[in-house]
Structure formats: C-alpha cells, structure tokens
Amino acid sequence: MNLVDKRGLAIGLGLSVLACVALPAVLSPYWIYLAISAVVSAVIMQSYGVIVGRVGVMSLCQMSFAAIGAWVVLRLNVADAPGGFFVWLVLGGLAAVPVGVAIGLPALRIRGVNLAVVTFGFAVSADIVWNANPFPGAKELKMLDRPEPFVTDESYFVFTVIVFTVLAVALGMIGKSRLGLSWYELRHSERSAASHGVSVARSKLAAFAISAFVAGIGGGLLAGQLSLVVPSNFAMGQSLALFAVAIMIGPHHPEGAVMGGIFGAIMPTIMEKVSLPQDFGGVLFGVGALLALRSGLSQTDLTRMRKRERGARKLLKAGEDAKEAKEAEGGATAAPTAPVAPAPVRRPAADRGPCLAVQGLTVRFGEVVALDAVDLTVPEGAVVGLIGPNGAGKSTFISAVTGFVAGYGGTVELAGKRLDKLGPSVRAKRGLRRTFQTTAIAPELTQYEYLAIGAGRRLSRGEADELLEFFGCPPGEVPVSIVDAGTRRLLDVAAAIAARPKVALLDEPAAGQSAAESLRLGDRLTRAPEAFGVSILLVEHDMELVQATCEEVTVLDFGHVIASGPTADVLADAAVRAAYLGAADVPAT
C-alpha cells in the first residue's frame, strides 16, 4: 500500500470515528435520519465501486441485489429466526451472491451496452416481482426491531458507519490483492489480463459476487432503518440514478462512496435549505458526468492520480538532483557511461533442448490462410527472432501460440508438454507469457502494482526494483499515468519477465524507442535469459536490434517460412532480402 493510500485510510478511519462521536451529538433527529440514509446509500455505492468503478462493467441492477438482502432480513424477522439482526444482515448479503453470479454469467460473452441491457432487464423483472409480491411483514405489519445497543436513530447511525468502514477496509484490502488489481486491468484490456495469467471468467464472476454481497448488506441496512420496506425503495430507476452517480464520482474509493451517498440522500434537502432550485442539482450532475465521460476517469480517480503524480514528480526530481550532485562532486574525473556489456557466452542452440516447440502451425480465417504449416523452436536460454514484412503473420503466430487464436492446426509444446486446447490464461500460468504491439496499462496503477499483476505471485519490493532497474524504468512508486509510451513498453516487458516464465514472446518491444534506447533494450534482452531464466521469442522490425540480440531467426512471408537458422546467415539470404527489402539484388552489408 503506497503512502497516499495509507494516508487516505488513516484519514478515513479518523473521519469515521469523528462522525460516530460528533454528528449524533450536534444534529437534529431529522438530519440524523438523513445521515443514516446517506451512509446506507454509501454502502450500496460501494457495490457499484466494485463492478462499475474497478471492473468497468455497466451493471444497472445493483438495487435489485439490495432488495434481495432486505427481503431475506425481513423474511427471517417474520419467522423469528435465530441469530438476530446481525446474522440476518450477513445472510441477506450472502443470499444476493448466487444471483449476482448468475447475472454475471452473460458478462463472460457480452459487454458494454449489450450487458447493460441484460442487467437492466433483470432490474425490470425484479421490479415486477417486488410489486406483485409484498415484502415480508408488509401485510401483517410486523416491524423489524433494531438490535441492542443500536435501537435509537443516533446509535443506528453509528452502526451503519461501522458497517461502511468494515466494508471499505475489506474492499481496500481486496483492491490491493492480485484479484483487485486484475479488475483494473480487465477494465482496460481483457486480453492483457489473460496474458498475465488472470482468469477473466473467475475475476469477473468474483466481482459480481462481491458487489452483490455488498449491495445485499446495504439492502439489509435499509430494512433496519425503515423497519418495513416497499418496492419503490428498490425501483429500477434507483439503479439507473446510482449508476450515473458512480460514473461521475467513482465509488471504488471510500471518499467517492461517501460523496455518492450524500449526493443521493442529502443533496436535495441541502438545496432546499439554501433556496436553490432542485434543477440546479441536475446541472451539477450533468457537468460532472460529462467531465467523467470526457476523461474516462471518475473525479476520485483524477484526484488520487494527481496526488500520486505530484509525489512521483518530487521523487523523480530528487533522484535527478542526487545524480547531478554526484556528477558535480566527481567533476572532470567522473567516469564515462558504462559500455554495453558483452553478450554472455552460450552453448550453440543445437546443443540445448527445445523450450518451445511449434510444429505445423496453421491458422485460417475463412478462405485466408494466415499461417501455413509453420515450424519454429525456441531453445532453452535463447533469444530467437521472428521477422518478416507487415502482414506476414508474426502477430498471428504469437496469438495462436499463446492461445488467443483457437482452432489452429499443428501443435504447441512448452518444455515437452502440449498446450493445445488450453486457454491463454492457463498457458500463461504454465510459463508462456507475451506482450502486445499496443500497451493497455491502467493509468491508475503504479509500476509496482502492474508488476504484481504480471508476476502472478507475491513479488517482493526488492525483486520489483531489480526488474525496473534492469529494464531502465523509473522507481516503482511512479504511477503509469506519467510515464511515456516507450517506458510503458519496457514496463510491459518487465511485467512479462516478472512471472519468471519459461518463454516470453515479445511483440515489437522496441516500437517508439530511439536508436540508442533500442540498443540498450537489445543488451537487456541478451542478458535476460541468464538473469531471469527465460527464453525469448522476439518479433521486431529493427534489424540492428535483431542482429545484436538474436542467435537464430525465422522469417515469415505471407504465412510461410522462407528461411530459418543462424541470424547472420538468414539475413544474408537472397530470398529474405527480396521479401523484406523488396529487391533481390540488394547488396549484403
């Protein structure tokens, strides 16, 4: 947990204690009631924070999950079930979990507006059911009694704050786990998440389950506040309104959830008290929503990112100042920049066993043959190149080998074990990692957090620092939002290597790098097998990088292998030069 998050947690806990002590003593009964409504709304907003804020799924049925929680609490109250309100509250949240998982199943195949329609359809159906069947206790007017010592509104307010705080801390801990960090990556790129060994299905269903549980808790708290509830308390319009607030504010942070709760429960009353028209609230909301849609980030995300960026810039400035001071202290006798280290001496590739063996790989898209019976081997501890003109099938080869293209012909073996018919996340866990031509890293993450996702295991701060220094990235506390595109590509490579895979397939990692940066990358890739125990398949257009890095090269042209062997021999081949340079009589260099 970084300094900003620790400070925010401490401030949040302090404000919670202050609210529990001070507000009941100074507010009138009317405002205490509104404060309870705000905290209950903030609890429900936290469910939006999981599914909307972190995962980026358009879920429009969270109030339906809250209704399930309220129904269970009231039903157990009518039955005089053992355990009391505290147990009933937890059971209400658990009862919403299987429904949340069921609603999440369509999210495995559809997304965006189509998924929003599915979730809204459930909200409409639930609305019809609640209106046709009164909530338990409504007919016989059996009220829900609050438990001791939270009988009064003042004490029940304290209880709702305690529940909110416990949930906020628990969700914060989940958010810092690999599961929680993977949600951010899912929001930006499911393919990138799968390439890091994240099970997209499990991660999404876990998000739906947790968000449904939290919403169910919120519904139970509402039942405790009102003693009896009616269908209008959970109308589908409420889900739509809270979804819009979630987009604008960002309830995946506690302060955002509180702001959302206040906005929904208290803002109309405040505006009435200060003699502002109610329509003015709609104007404020509309401006905030437009800003959120324009930036792609909520207001709490933007605020937190700016705080992180200010701290990171101070850190970078301090590092630059220290470096300049050290150089000034050395004066004219300062040592020049260290030369590129010589490449490690390795046994010939033929003397090493194959780490990755691809045989007869064939990929068809309809009538188009993208790859035709391609054979390629990556020996243990080797850096092997895959080159060819644009459209030759290089990225298709990587996608097929890593499981992103299904239904190919041929075989893929990793360390002697077949990977065919396995999905990309399973192949990644088996030790086959890849990067993409276009990076899609969540800007909310720090470099440490992104490496933790890529590693797929507990990654010590020392190991992360070693990786970042090896690939020339800034310190790990620096957020992704302020690093340039070239550094993000290096960070992508570092994340792939962080898992210590058997083979890393790098798709044009030098794109956007200067000539000097490309040569430094080549030096790092040359030393990576010995430093991290990984073999590398490099797809690249930079021939200087290929020559400096790769022991062997395979050349594709229109999906066919036209040459394969030692790098110098292949690049001197006339057929390769004709295909790659467009002329058969180009003199060799």
Image (tube, rainbow, N blue to C red):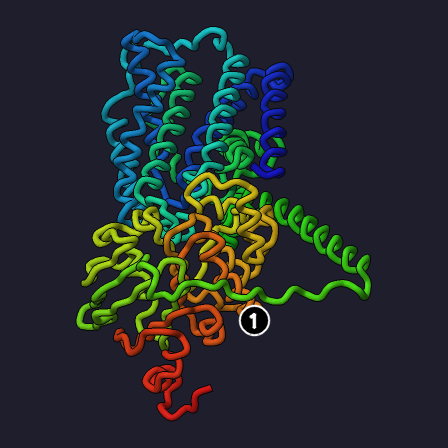
Nearer to us in this view, 247 or 176: 176
Q: Is residue 105 visible?
A: yes
Q: Residue at x 35, y 9 (%)?
A: 83
Q: Position of residue 387 (x, y in %)?
A: 37, 73
Q: Quadrant of the N terminus?
A: top right
Q: Position of residue 160 (x, y in %)?
A: 49, 20
Question: Is the residue 369 above or below the residue 150 in the image?
Answer: below
Q: Residue at x 32, y 16 (%)?
A: 74
Q: Residue at x 43, y 8 (%)?
A: 147
Q: Quadrant of residue 75?
A: top left
Circle 1 residue: 514
Name which residue type carries label 1. Answer: Ser
Question: Is the residue 440 above or below the residue 48 in the image?
Answer: below
Q: Is residue 435 left or right of residue 27?
A: left
Q: Is residue 268 visible?
A: no
Residue farthest along the bottom direction in this orientation? 585
Q: Is residue 128 left or right of residue 539?
A: left
Question: Is the residue 518 above or below the residue 102 in the image?
Answer: below
- Determine the secondary structure under disc 1: loop
Q: Is residue 403 left or right of residue 20?
A: left
Q: Is residue 530 left or right of residue 477?
A: left
Q: Quadrant of residue 229?
A: top left
Q: Position of residue 271 (x, y in %)?
A: 58, 34
Question: Is the residue 111 above or below the residue 559 in the image?
Answer: above
